[in-house]
Image (cartoon, rainbow, N blue to C red):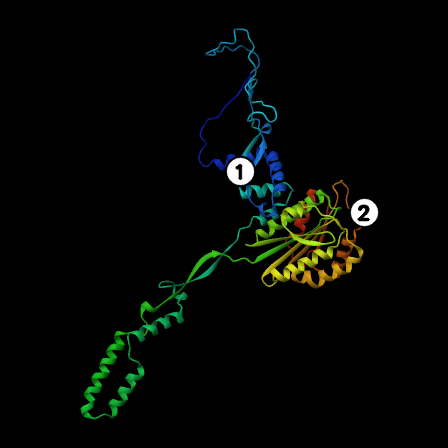
Amino acid sequence: MAIHIVDRRLNPGSKSLENRQRFLRRAKALVQGAVKKSSQERDIKDVLEGGEISIPLDGMNEPRFRREGGTRDMVVPGNKKFVEGDMLPRSGQGSGKSNGPGEGDGEDGFRFVLSRDEFVDLFLDDLELPDLAKRKLAEVESEGIHRAGYTTSGSPANISVSRTVGRAMARRVALRRPRPEALAALEAELADCSEARRAEIEAEIEVLKARIRKIPFIDPIDIRYRRFETVPKPAAQAVMFCLMDVSGSMTEHMKDLAKRFYMLLYVFLKRRYRHVEIVFIRHTDKAEEVDEETFFRGPASGGTLVSSALQVMHDIVRSRFRPADWNIYAAQASDGDNSSSDSELVARLLTDLILPASQFYAYLEVGQDNGLTFDMPDSSLWTLYERLRADGAPLSARKVSERNEIFPVFHDLFKRRGKQERVA
């Protein structure tokens, strides 16, 4: 017979977060599996958000004490069915809780909500991102000082001379303060006037001097100080171009590798830019801008011409994203296939139009999930990009075939380097 021990003690103060983290550590494998499943169903823009996840109840068994043997007497009120010596059914049998598929209200999952930071940490931990890079992704925006008008009090160092002098001049004009030229003219006239006129001029001079003393040149009410406020430091905006070959040779596994790389790039950009736009361009022998659902799941057929995607990207940059106003990032995913006649056009578009306008351009060549490495000869697209890199083109290229290779590749591309280093 199983004995269930229920701890009904109140949760101690300041222990909620600690208990929650203890639960996440104990059920880490289940929670990571749920986060992995949830991330596959999310859009790229939603990967940073927390939310509700569900884990199976059969993985949440609590420790139990069990007593073997012995005798136990029970008094069951209202019994009209059993007599002494009858065997009682096990708990749950005949109670309607163990329903078959589609029957009753069976409970098969434990649901709880993950915060934004918990979801991102589990998302990163699943693929073994180094702690250094994880901390970099968790950075918050710094605050800066912003001008916020003027105030009547403040530090002498913040006095606005131009605003103060302007207000003083307006006050003197409004109160009709005598001008120094008028006083000088009366004093000059006093030197050459007759005795009868002298007394009158002296009286006028005294009146002017009295008004000057009453209306000062600078009054405390004129002084204005520059006012500053602490606001989030403005960040530049970025646009992220996702280019992907969707011809028949691209399998669902390859598209999943590409999506995880795009997710990481979006996480990286979103933590460094306040505003990030995403543009999805898919191509076969023709390219088009599409939404995310069509990009990853929409059917497509045809050959492969990479130049069509590059041309569409260039047209979009020219019409909507001026390089002077936007930081442009591009990530291209492909299995490496491309028409041999298209190579030179791809090279010209990259070197003349795309790379000069881009902050970063990465090519990810994805392979089959068969446990084999890229021992096959290099693809035509990989060979072309290697030639461009050898000529000094600022683009990065990597190969992946397994999910656990995505984070090492991403970290290698974005790790902090010295001024003389560049991404190869």
- Quadrant in the picture for the N terminus: top right
Element under label 1? strand
Residue occupying the far top of the picture:
84
Q: Earlier in the sequence, mark 1 or mark 2?
A: 1
Camera-nearest residue between 348 and 197: 348
The residue labelled by disc 1 is: 113
Name which residue lies at 64% across and 59% down: 316
Residue 304 visible somewhere in the drawing = yes
Camera-nearest residue between 213 and 100: 100
Name which residue lies at 60% across and 51% down: 268
Tally of numbered tags: 2
Which labelled disc corresponds to residue 376?
Answer: 2
Percent position (x, y) of residue 28?
59, 35
Percent position (x, y) of residue 180?
31, 82
Name which residue lies at 46% across and 37% down: 14
Name which residue lies at 25% across and 79% down: 209
Which kind of residue does numbered mark 2 sit on?
A: Met
- Quadrant in the picture for the C terminus: bottom right
Residue 395 visible somewhere in the drawing = no
Element under label 2? loop
